Image: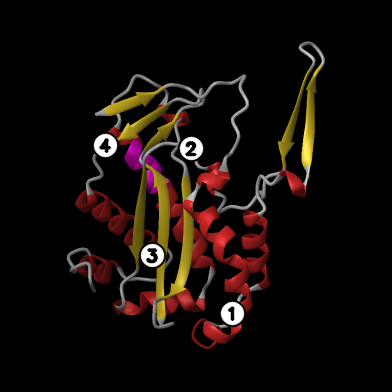
Amino acid sequence: MSTPLPPHPGCRYRPREVFRSALWRILADHLNVFLREYESRFEAKLGPLPPESEKVLTRLACCGDPNEGVTLLRCKECEVTLAVPFSCKTRICPGLLPEVPYRHLVFTLPKKMGIRTRFRQDRSLFRTTARLVTRLLTRWMREQLSIQQDLKRAHPGILLAQQSFGDEIKLHPHYHVLTTAGLFLPDGSFYSVSDFDQAELTARLRRSVLAWLVKRNLLTPENAARMQVWPLER
């Protein structure tokens, strides 16, 4: 079943209000301590903190703070002036997320058949697989909705992070995906997908990835057929 939400108003300023998010509150309370103590507490296990990560976290902590600067907007017709604080423009900013349902999905790659080793040897496989996952999720959600709309122009909101290691810093290529549980139409309306069939989605993703690896000559058709029936933990 699809549940429509009303379109976002087009002529109304809506503050990001990033300060209401749990992530911003954590950074506001603990970022300085985290940066000061990272080297002594975490570097030996997790490695040095990348400069870009520190930069992003610092920018996010200042997001929406008028002390960091504002843009003055003025309407000549109604003579209203509005001061809009600068945003951090980071990808992890919670102020960018619409207030709709979300799902957190994790996609992993098998240990056997040398799949993980191939990803370590060719880093471009991460990007290509990420695009495949995004296209499959979009197509799958379009199929779940039976609405009289042009679904070719409907898209989910997806944030995808790829990782090449696990908790013990061992080779473990996998993806964390934060996706809207539904699709946005060009007019801003949102249609939710209430039922995520995990088994069906997993099977679709497995078939797509295996077919792509066979096409790239990274896996034989025979081995791909065997992997279709493997338990997920392999």
Left or right: 82, with 132 as reference point: right
**Main SS category, magenta section:** helix
Q: Residues within 10 Å of mark 1 (few under 14, many from 20)?
A: few
Residue labelled with disc 3: 213
Instruction: Give the secondary structure at mark 2.
Output: loop
In the rendered structure, which segment of residues is drawn in magenta?
135-141
> Which one is in front, 58 or 135?
58
Which type of secondary structure does the marked residue at label 3 adopt?
Answer: helix
Q: Which residue is depicted at the point 47% across and 22% down?
A: 7
Q: Earlier in the sequence, mark 4 or mark 2?
A: 2
In this rendering, would 124 be left or right of 183?
right
Q: Nearer the viewer, residue 21 or 188?
A: 21
Tell me where residue 89 appears, x and y as whole percent: 66, 49
Q: Is residue 179 above or below residue 76?
A: below
N-terminal of the pair, mark 3 or mark 1, is 1
Q: Decide which of tag 1 and tag 2 comes sooner along the chain.
A: 1
Please tell me which residue is depicted at 24% across the width and 55% down the height of the picture.
Answer: 203
Q: CA distance from mark 3 to mark 4?
A: 32 Å
- CB under 8 Å between discs 1 and 2: no
> CA gap, disc 3 to disc 1?
43 Å
Above or below: residue 184 compared with residue 47: above
Mark 2 vs mark 3, foreground winner is: 2
Earlier-in-chain disc, 1 versus 4: 1
- Residue 194: assigned label: 4
For label 2, the residue is 98
Q: Amino acid at mark 4?
A: Ser
Q: Which residue is mark 1?
A: 37
Q: Amino acid at mark 2?
A: Pro
